[in-house]
Amino acid sequence: MMPVIAVALVALAVSITRPDVVYRIHRARDGPQRKSAGVKKHWDALTHKLFTTQLSGDFLRKSASQLDLFAACAQSGLTPSQAAYAVALTEETSRGRTRTRSEWSDVAILLEMGMPAERAWQPLAGHPALGELVTVARASERSGATLVEACERLARQLRARASDLSLARAERAGVLIALPLTVCFLPAFFLLGLAPVVISLGIGIFS
């Protein structure tokens, strides 16, 4: 009986350390294999949406800097349209966007045309980080509240979110760093830790 137990343990260890098994484990994240083009297309769209909708800390901090610039320009005496245009110039220069206007450019143009805030700030409604500014601008026009203070508050919130996001990613990085060690030591644990215990128990039971 003891040889049978030993053979079973060796087979278990071999199955764990087999390259094709490890390959299948790692490839499970890649989604459906050898499926139709339609399934693969939907899978790619889902993963792309998952990763692109997650805001990075740099993106949040950049959006906060745009709000700070808008608030500083407004405090210096510029009109909202001029302040929005200043932010647009900075954004387009940093991105190298010479042919495509940014959302801030559209806001500046609409404000200069005298559009109400509900319409003028609409281009930023779809912005992942600055969408709340549209609601704030509309409320500011109705209630007379200071838009500068709202921008400063939103900038602080974005920076706080960026810090939380950086901390969360650092914690996940620690977990990912430990995963290779787990994969390496798991077969050794089965062979050197569990195998002697099971063999000794088998000897004690069947002897």
Image (cartoon, rainbow, N blue to C red):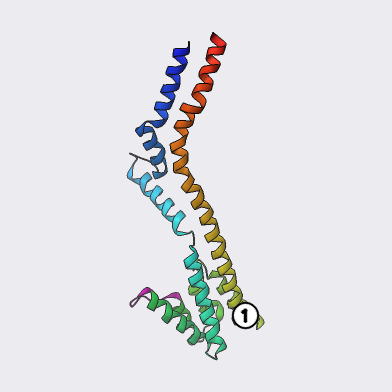
Residue 201 screen position, x and y as percent: 55, 17
Residue 22 screen position, x and y as percent: 39, 36
**Residue 66 versus residue 187: which sits nearer the camera?**
187
Residue occupying image coordinates x 40% and y 27%: 15
Residue 41 screen position, x and y as percent: 36, 49
The residue identified by callout 1 is 149
Instruction: From the viewer's perspective, tell me whether residue 105 is left or right of residue 38.
Output: right
**Residue 53 versus residue 206: which sits nearer the camera?**
206
Task: Please say whether residue 50 is visible from this viewpoint.
Answer: yes
Residue 114 screen position, x and y as percent: 51, 86
Give the quadrant of residue 149: bottom right
For disc 1, the neighbor class at 10 Å (few under 14, some 14 to 19, many from 20) is few
**Residue 119 versus residue 157: which sits nearer the camera?**
157
Q: Residue furthest top?
A: 207
Secondary structure at numbered mark 1: helix
Residue occupying image coordinates x 47% and y 48%: 176
Q: Amino acid at mark 1?
A: Glu
Q: Is residue 9 above or below residue 43?
A: above
Residue 108 falls within the magenta-colored stretch:
no
Magenta span: helix, strand or loop, mainly? loop
Instruction: From the viewer's perspective, tell me whether residue 123 is left or right of residue 140.
Output: left
Magenta part of the chain: 95-103
**Residue 182 versus residue 28: which sits nearer the camera?**
182
